[in-house]
Image: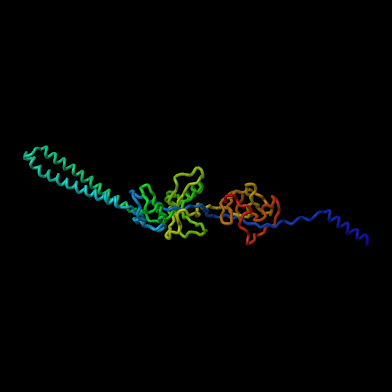
Amino acid sequence: MLSAVTLLLLAACAKKQSGPSKAAAAQVSVATVEQRDVDIYGDWVATLDGYVNAQIQPQVSGYLIKQDYQEGSVVHVDDVLFEIDPRPFQATLDQAEGQLAQAQAQLRLADINVKRDTPLAKARAIAQSQLDNDVQQQATQHASVSTAQANVEQAQLNLGFTKVRSLITGIAGRAQTQVGNLVSPSTTLTSVSQVNPIKVYFAISEQEYLALSGRVKAGGKADLLRSGNSVSLQLTLGNGSIYPYKGQIVFVDRQINPQTGTIQIAGSFSNPQNLLRPGQFGRIKAETEVRHGALLIPQLAVNELQGSYQVAVVAPDNTVQIRTVELGPQIGSDWIITSGIKPNERVATEGVSSLKDGMRVSPQQPAAASATMPQKKAEGQ
């Protein structure tokens, strides 16, 4: 009996000294590197502005006697916005018309003198010098009539300018001066902005500009300005809603801003309901290029370590290879990887930071409801 107990104790000690059994391989979810053509989109902060912004200023000086429009309303071309006291200008016009009538009467008298003295001079009944004086007087009176007519036209213009009109169709802003004030051509009365269509300004990087330019030229267009609808712009408003109308590029700045490395672009959007107004902010989205044969992996497969990005590649023998990769644009819940992996390789999608090079793992299919954000998203992405 004692011998049996002793044998059991010796067997237990021997088992303890032999050490633990080999640990089981860790289970990790994996995803296959996908290779396909993807559309790359740019996303930029945008500022809205009127297609045309007109500063309404009077062309004559005088006292403002009437405001004819409602602030914030839609006005049309030639609508009267303000009225200046017309009485001084009416008096100037009356005086100019009187001077014109006087000049015309003097011209008629000069014509009579020339007509009468011409045959007399030929018959030597009067001196030739008298006819010369008559002709000179006739020419002088023609000039006087022309000057008087110009004065009448100027007076008529000035009288018409007492009604300050809108030169464009758009939304009129707040009045900058009040009825009763003395105004002059340097006075801004209000502003009118054409908002249908409306302009949207945004700045893109030099690389994005080159990509867009290359795309439109490949499509047979001369440049971005003449790209037409080949570059479709999508506008997201400040409340997150997508504007229902698509825009197109209508302006490309002449140079790259050396401080920011960007170039300013303007898009035009239809605005039939005047929903969009100058000063609003939004975001512009447009397809910049098509990346052929891009390699994509889930965001969760990427781990950031001291400014570099790593993935855990699961080799065919189920051992882990930690590789440094370079990230491209983000496409939905995936990253484009520009270097470091190959098509159809497997990458771990969870617990990447705890995996070590050479570690043996047991690959598992990812859960259906896996998260979509990387362990530490790349700064600036």
The answer to whether residue 106 is left or right of residue 3 is left
Q: Is residue 141 visible?
A: yes
Residue sitting at the far front: 180
| Image quarter of residue 74 | bottom left
Residue displayed at 50% across by 46% down: 262
Q: Residue furthest right?
A: 2
Task: Locate residue 285 relative to residue 68 in the image: left or right.
Answer: right
Q: Determine the residue positioned at 51% across, 59% down.
A: 241
The foreground one among 173 and 281 is 173
Residue 143 vertical position relative to residue 73 in the rendered view, above or below: above
Residue depicted at x 57% and y 50% = 380
Q: Is 17 situated left or right of 235 in this image?
A: right
The residue lying toward the viewer, choosing from 200 and 37, is 200
Nearer to us in this view, 277 or 292 = 277
In this picture the colour scheme is: rainbow
Q: In this view of the protein, can residue 52 be seen by the observer?
A: no
How far from the left and from the top, in percent, is residue 227? 43, 52
Residue 154 spot, x, y in % from top left: 27, 48
